[in-house]
Image (spheres, grey):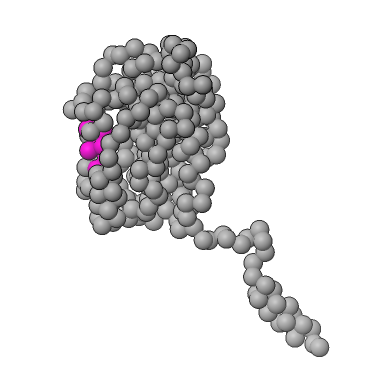
Amino acid sequence: MTARWRLGLALFLLAAAGPPASAQGRGQDRPVDLELVLAVDVSWSMDEEEQRLQREGYVEALRSEEILSALRSGAYGRVGLAYVEWAGVADQRVVVPWGIVEDRGSLDAFAARLEAAPLRRSAFTAIGDSLAFTAGLFAGNGMEGARRAVDVSGDGPNNVGPPVVPARDAVVAEGIVVNGLPLMLRPGSPGVGTMPNLDVYYEDCVIGGPGAFSLPVRERSEIKAAIQRKLVTEIAGVPPRAVPAAFAGNAPRIDCQIGVKAMPSWMIDP
């Protein structure tokens, strides 16, 4: 057996055996510019009109030309998207599961599924628990994103379940950026409803990671435009606007446990 023949046989056997275990499965996931989970608050502090406006805002944004243009600006021209509604501890539901949006047809199909889903409301505001849940959705979704993000919208502070800051930090440690859409539509009271400085709470306690940003909404008439602006910013990968104080080396300007401390003990989940 000549050396050339032995080399050829070895190469044939190596090819027949397939890639090594450490490499098997690589290249299986479809590349996308962004993997994005939209995590939407459906707690009781959101009244029915606010929930309707919020849902309509996402549906209309997905059907807009601005979102389509943002998609086309990416290297791959496609984004992985999932829509989740959350409230209290262990109260998260995937309303529209992972799908790839890359053209008018796929955007309209995602929007139609979201529009057809019934609205719901539930008790408590467990931001920390919702972050842990949404972070777990990325594994095995069949996509490989150049960026990964969770977009949290809500109208109050974390008031039950795991503390929000450690949960946020754990998500960011996985390479997932957390952005925010604080809904500041009425003063309320910390822990039960909204809070007057919810924008500061989101900046210091909720958002995190490279390029993280928070876009506060102060009027109902602003909800739809804000949602579209937020999605365009995320999909197009606009340069960072805001970095949370915790990641800039500064102490938070607000007590990140303010919601839990304000809740009567008898109201908190066991």
Residue pictured at 29% horizontal, 55% vertical: 106
Q: Residue 265: percent from the left, percent from the top?
A: 47, 12
On screen, residue 35 above or below 220: below
Quadrant containing the N terminus in the rendered view: bottom right
Q: Do we see residue 62 in this rendering?
A: no
State the residue lying farthest toward the right. Answer: 1
Q: For residue 5, which quarter of the picture?
A: bottom right
Q: Do we see residue 99 in this rendering?
A: yes
Residue 86 included in the magenta stretch of the image: no
Q: Residue 197: percent from the left, percent from the top?
A: 35, 15
Q: Nearer the viewer, residue 43 or 66?
A: 43
State the residue lying farthest toward the left. Answer: 221
Range drawn in magenta? 53-59
Residue pictured at 37% horizontal, 52% vertical: 99
Left-right relation of 172 to 217: right
Q: Nearer the viewer, residue 116 or 74?
A: 116
On screen, residue 111 above or below 259: below
Q: Residue 107: percent from the left, percent from the top?
A: 28, 51
Residue pictured at 54% horizontal, 26% vertical: 166
Determine the main secondary structure of the stretch shown in magenta.
helix
Left-right relation of 56 to 126: left
Q: How many labels does the image show?
A: 0
Q: Residue 34: percent from the left, percent from the top?
A: 41, 47
Q: Which of 199 and 116 is in front in this view?
A: 116
Residue pictured at 50% horizontal, 34% vertical: 132
